[in-house]
Image (cartoon, grey):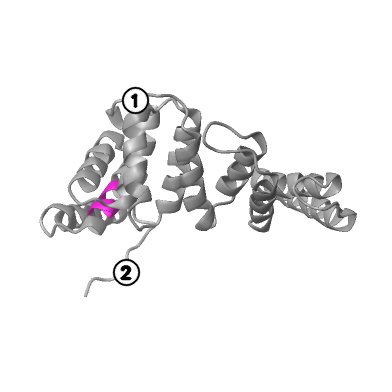
Amino acid sequence: MAGLINFEDEKEVKQFLDNLGVEYSYQCYREKDPEGCQRLADYFEGVKKDYESTAQVLKHNCEVNGHGESCYKLGAYHVTGKGGVTECLKTAYTCFMKACHTKGKKSVDACHNVGLLAHDGRALEGGPDPVAAQQYYVKACDGGFAPSCFNLSALYIQGSAGVEKNMSLALKYAMRACELGHVWGCSNASRMYKLGDGTEKDDEKAEKLRNRAKELHGQQKEQQLKFGE
């Protein structure tokens, strides 16, 4: 059994990390283990800072193994052209779509990204698709992704082709965003209760939601301060 690694010994640490790379490569390409491929991609990205190799492994693991997290990360690479891949929102959209429909760590995030790109329209031939955006925001919101819940609320407040203005649903999703800790979800829900928009006026609920928004805002500022210390 191997002994413990002395992390103060630079040569020993380098050998340990090199061995990890060999192990993950074996898992990925010889054992054909999708999780091994994901570990190899994380290794190239986080340890070696070799983004071209990262992109190659992500592409293999997404296209050959259909691994959701790899598809998600590959999509993110295509958004910016990282690792030498083509900068292309259409390709990113396809990758996020695969990840969204694959159960995995990043499936909810991927569904949100599909919603964003459909809402924005730059990844689609026909421009913005509010109906597709709504469908994928719902999937992500159901998965507990607060920004998708908030974006759904905004969609229903504005109304658009295929998605009718519906203040009751706008309030429902603003409330869900608030429950998940989204400041502006709480703020919008407070305003809707204050005005009686999509619901009966309720000053008490409006005040509670307003205070919750203030509380969340304070927490965010506190976290930023701690991060900067």
Counting other residues with Cα less than 10 Å from the Cα at mark 2, is it few (<14), some (14-19), or many (20 or more)? few
In the foreground, 159 or 39 = 159
Residue 62 place in picture, x, y as percent? 25, 46
Q: Position of residue 27 (x, y in %)?
A: 17, 58
Circle count:
2
The N terminus appears in which quarter of the rendering? bottom left
Whether residues under marks 1 and 2 lie with C-beta atoms below 8 angstroms apart, the answer is no
The amino acid pointed to by label 1 is: Glu
User: Seen from this angle, which residue lies furthest right?
Assistant: 203
Q: Answer with mark 1 or mark 2, whichever residue precedes in sequence.
A: 2
Q: Which residue is mark 2?
A: 4
Amino acid on which the number 2 mark rests in the picture:
Leu
Q: Which residues are magenta?
A: 37-42
Instruction: Report crowding for label 1: few under 14, some 14 to 19, many 20 or more residues within 10 A (C-alpha).
Output: some
Residue 213: within the magenta? no
Find the distance from the CA under tag 1 to the CA under tag 2.
Answer: 43 Å
- Relative height, residue 7 to residue 196 (above, below): below
Residue lying farthest to the bottom in this orientation = 1
Q: Residue at x 27, y 52 (%)?
A: 67
Residue 121: x percent and y percent?
45, 27
Q: Which residue is mark 1?
A: 87
Q: Left or right: 208 with respect to 99?
A: right
| 214 over 51 or under it: above or below | below
Answer with the quarter of the image where residue 53 lies.
Answer: top left
- Magenta span: chief secondary structure: helix
Q: Nearer the viewer, residue 18 or 137?
A: 137
Please name which of the two marks, 1 or 2, marks the residue nearer to the observer. 1
